[in-house]
Image (cartoon, rainbow, N blue to C red):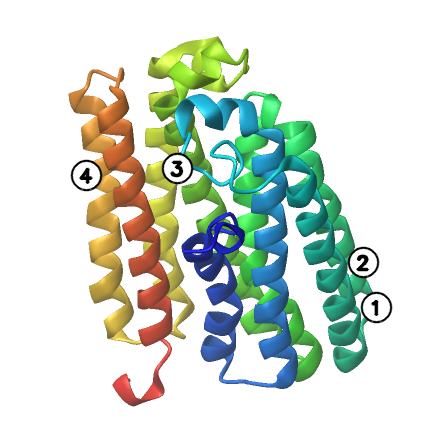
Amino acid sequence: MSAYIKILRPVNEALLALPVVIIAIVGHDFTISVLLGTLLVLLMAGAGNVINDVFDHKIDAVNKPDRPIPSGRISLKNARIYAGILYIISAFISLIISYLINNFWFFVIIICSAVILYAYSRYFKAMPLVGNIVVGVMVGLSFVIGGIILLCETKDWEIFKVSVYIGLLAAVVNVARELIKDMEDVRGDKLCGARTFPILYGKKASSIITILLLAVTVALGIFLYTFGIFNIAYIIIIIIAVFLCVYSAYALFASKLEPAEATCTKVTKFLKIAMAFSLLAITIGSFDILR
């Protein structure tokens, strides 16, 4: 795989862009604006990943030396230029979408999001818990972006409300996952002088917060069914995601709230799978044919 593609983290990009399509499926509305919105999130996520690797290249040299920058496959200068190009294209696409949906505020929201993505890598990531919350909010925003596009085109406030609730669900589970990733990277982060929540307050406090966030995630996943817009397939599939979240919480309990690096790696993967099943539940749960 080309280093310039790998640095984008295409799998993570797809998971972030998919929400726009999923909200369109929920709202039964597909337009050129939705397609452009999907491309927009792909490019924005890619730009965020690249600039994040630029600022994290010293930490990655310890924790993940095979990444494009620490391995020498992409220079810092080229990575910065690459991120800049992705941001510029994203801004141009968001301007087109704003014109199509007749809402200039959409463009403003995207520009603000781009600034936050940069600020996250430059400043917020170093702030314990704040950086984790910013990541969660930006992931949740992917759903809201789809909701805004559909609201402007269909005037359907119900679908917009659903997009906000789904975005909240995504935000909470991602904050939990980011905390676990911080616990996983404690060794390398300490060597580089990072001030993550697990380093400052310990794994036990981090595990307790993570477990509470997973409990909220489970509650929100089940609560979404009460909106009455999903079929029975939603609740069947979401049970798998719920099980993975509960098992992840159990893994933290089993380690006496002091999970080893290997345990954190395993839980991180479980939560990524849980997120995938949640997206699948929302998608299939929106099919009228299954009602």
**Residue occupying the far right of the picture:** 104
User: Is any part of residue 46 visible from this angle?
Assistant: yes
**Amino acid bearing label 3:** Arg
Q: Position of residue 173 (x, y in %)?
A: 41, 43
Question: Which label number is shown at residue 285?
Answer: none
* In the displayed structure image, the side of residue 223 where residue 117 appears, left or right: right
Indicate the secondary structure of the residue bearing disc 3. helix
Quarter location, residue 222: bottom left
Q: Name the residue under label 2.
A: 108
> What residue is drawn where x is 42% and y is 25%?
182
The residue lying toward the viewer, choosing from 126 and 58, is: 58
Marks 4 and 1, the one that precedes in the sequence: 1
Q: Where is residue 208 in the image (x, y as percent from the top left)?
A: 35, 22
Indicate the secondary structure of the residue bearing disc 1. helix
Q: Determine contact: label 4, label 1, CB under 8 Å.
A: no
Q: Name the residue under label 4.
A: 247
Q: Marks 4/3: CA distance?
A: 14 Å
Q: Determine contact: label 4, label 3, CB under 8 Å.
A: no
Q: Name the residue under label 3.
A: 177
Marks 4 and 3, the one that precedes in the sequence: 3
Q: Name the residue under label 1.
A: 104
